[in-house]
Image (spheres, helix red, strand yellow):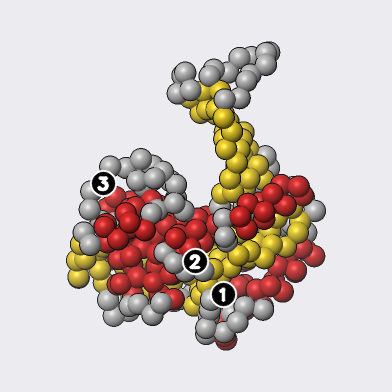
Amino acid sequence: MIYTIVLNPALDRIVDIDELLYDDVNTIIEETRLVSGKAIDISRVIRRLGGQSCLLGLAGGYNGFEVEGRLLAEGLVCELVRLSRETKTNIAIRQTRKNLRTIFSTADPQVSPIELSLFYDKVHDIPEDSFVVMSGSLVPGVSENFYAQIITALAGKNVRTILDADGEALKRGVESRPFLIKPNIHEFGRLVEKNVREVDDILDNIDSVLELVPHIVVSMGARGAVAVSRAERYHVVPPKVSVKSSMGAGDALVGGIVYSLSRGSSFIEAVTLGVACGTASTLNGAGGFCSLEDTEKIRKEVLVKNF
């Protein structure tokens, strides 16, 4: 079973108007409501590839009920711990005449120790031989050790943990020895505290991380990804495509990797599918919405360079 962890989902409201009028009534032309979050996009990709996952997360207030309902309506399985505070809302106002976009975001919800304890109970119930994906930002009330604690708690159950984080949360997670990490090139540079720009920079600084993490995938946007294990080193390069938006491409990459690994694929097969998913997602402008047709077409054109 694949589990994805989402601590900070958001309820997004995208509102279209002609032009913003101040101190006046603005008529909404169209409104779209959806749920966003890195782990959510990962679960969406897994489902589009034909797999299934379970979202473990936190959601609160009336927004939390809508978040859960919308996820279930998409066909995503989720187990959410109820918070006393409202789940975050993002309101995007798009002015069609001026082609402008303005976003209003509410604060992240504070998590109490009791609510966090209830979440840990769900983590401890994860069965042996599962895959667990941890990604995204932490919320107030959750320490930088959070991902590291989950990795440690699952270490004795042959659970393969995949971490996509940044900063101190990534550093502490690496020290707990996850199965795989997926930083982008900037996050990897912060992890090793070096100026990392090119493939050679990644390879020159990766050995110290490999001592703790057996599989590392560093995403590089349109340049693909560097995939390194203790026995393999690859540069996986996608074909050039017409990019609509690169937002969420890294999440689609992770979704393809974990789905492929759960099906028994090799490391390089998994990364190749992941790169195809990430590239396909740029055609649609949303990380969780890569089509299977686009993914399969792109995968045939992915180039794998062996070092």
- Comes first in the chain, label 2 or label 3: 2
Is residue 276 positioned above or below 1 on the image?
A: above
Amino acid, disc 2: Leu
Disc 3: which residue? 241
Disc 2: which residue? 163
Closer to us: 21 or 16:
16
Disc 1: which residue? 151
Point 60% across, 82% down: residue: 127
Closer to us: 257 or 219:
257
- How far is the residue under mark 1 from the one under mark 2? 9 Å
Q: Quadrant of residue 172?
A: bottom right
Amino acid, disc 1: Ile
- Comes first in the chain, label 3 or label 1: 1
What percent of the width, then of the height, locates residue 4?
55, 65
What percent of the width, then of the height, locates residue 74?
57, 55
| SS category of the residue bearing label 2 | strand
Amino acid, disc 3: Val
Point 20% across, 70% down: residue: 306
Q: Is residue 90 left or right of residue 2?
A: right
Q: Local crowd at mark 2 within 10 Å, few (<14), some, or many (≥20)? A: many
- How far is the residue under mark 2 from the one under mark 3? 28 Å
Closest to the camera, between mark 2 and mark 3, is 3
Closer to us: 79 or 52:
52
Q: Quadrant of residue 199?
A: bottom left
Q: In this orientation, does residue 195 appear?
A: no
Point 76% across, 63% down: residue: 115
- Comes first in the chain, label 1 or label 2: 1
Label pair 1/2, CB-CB below 8 angstroms: yes
